Amino acid sequence: MCRTIKAVLESSAALEDVKARGWVRTRRDAKGFSFLEINDGSCLGSLQVLIDAGVPGSEEVALMLTGSSVEVRGKLVESPGAGQAWELHAAEVRLIGKASGDYPLQKKRHGPEFLREIAHLRPRTNLFGAIFRTRSRLAHAVHRFFEERGFVWVHTPIVTASDCEGAGEMFRVTTQKVGGGKDVPEEDFFGKASYLTVSGQLEGETFACALSKIYTFGPTFRAENSNTTRHAAEFWMIEPEMAFCDLKGDMDLAEEFVKALTRSVLEGPQDDFGLFSNFVDKGLEERLRFIAERPFERVSYTEAVAILEKSGKSFEYPVAWGENLQSEHERYLTEEHCKCPVTVYDYPEAIKPFYMRRNDDGKTVAAMDVLVPGIGEIVGGSQREERYELLRATMEKDGLDVEAYGWYLDLRKYGSVPHAGFGLGFERMLMLATGVQNIRDVIPYPRTPGHCLP
């Protein structure tokens, strides 16, 4: 039976007969023998293979260039080399797939910009292999968190006719010719204009008002012409929704969730995490432990603006009540003023979407954002407006088609309850977990303005 290289490297004893497969990282030749270093992606470490001249398949060793796929069988013995417990003495070696000499991942270290242009090969590098193994483990931690708390996972649609955020930054889905051709939405495939979803929230609310506690976890899309390190046109969102829940309960769950995901990274495989903390961000472990172990600060939006105004800092974007907090403001609050994660709540009504519950002061809504050091906003949520007349009036004021959202208003007619939820950007959580500074490097195939490869 063929073993993963992870299983081989974790062996507790020498083995007489081991078979492993992988891709060649390096090859060193000497008189009468060669060394191969192979990796199969199951872990950060590679397996060193000693191939003596004359063993079956050794005549093909010269063809086993970096990037080639091979199969080796032999005896696992203690390695005399530093930094590795085991090596494989080959009894047989087989070339599965030869890599040509122009294989782009040679010994030299390549920067992330170059690797984004070969996204189909970058998972073979140490860094990106570690990133995407961490992405997989973090996804499992998401499901485990909600399963343990009695939430139901709901698959909300990717194609929708509703604009949850009301910003209009949506990708149109159509079978019709556009740009000079026929474009009649009512004659389109779905009989109306339809789009790629920006959020599963609205549909999630309908299930929360039946199953009490649900969450969504899937891709979302924004047609926003932004080229920052924190934005992508396609990204993944985790969105829990809870019936019989207010803003405080929403903030409690969001903070508990961020802490739980952070702990799962700290408690995960130390080889991958060690790569991040040693070579990507030397302050990573200290920052993650701080998030996992310390309570979050909570300040109102009004208090946050006052803190920023009194900071004496010269911000690129001016601070003013009624304006959105920018990344530089969020990072000041977390990294310099509070020196810990911060939950900001009760934002001005004018800068938040229609579905957020209006507060009694007539100026703010029951919204909250969780801000973390190094990233800024990682969670955004609110208590939802459960009062029919108030929600309808806000929708009309914002120019929404009330009839088109009739199904959403129905929730407020038939057994309405206080309910709340939030969204956590999965890629931003991965940036926090790995110390990687660009969202393009934590998603397998980044979609940004002007880039859609492959």
Image: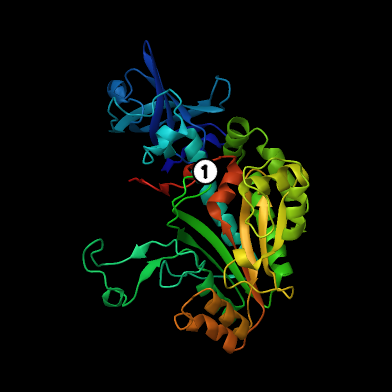
Task: Compare residues 241 and 375 and report the one nearer the observer.
Answer: 375
**What is the residue that sits farthest to the top in this orientation?**
31
Residue 14 located left or right of residue 376: left
Q: Is residue 203 above or below residue 232?
A: below
Kind of residue indicated by mark 1: Thr
Residue beneath the point at 39% across and 35% down: 22
Evaluate whether residue 147 shows in this view.
no
Residue beneath the point at 41% across and 35% down: 115
- Neighbor class of circle 1 (other Cα within 10 Å; few <14, some 14-19, many 20+) is few
Color encoding of the figure: rainbow
Describe the element under mark 1 as helix, strand or loop: loop
Task: Compare residues 47 and 242 and report the one nearer the observer.
Answer: 242
Q: Is residue 124 above or below residue 250?
A: above
Residue under label 1 = 229
* Residue 391, x across and y down, in percent: 59, 80
Evaluate whether residue 346 shows in this view.
yes
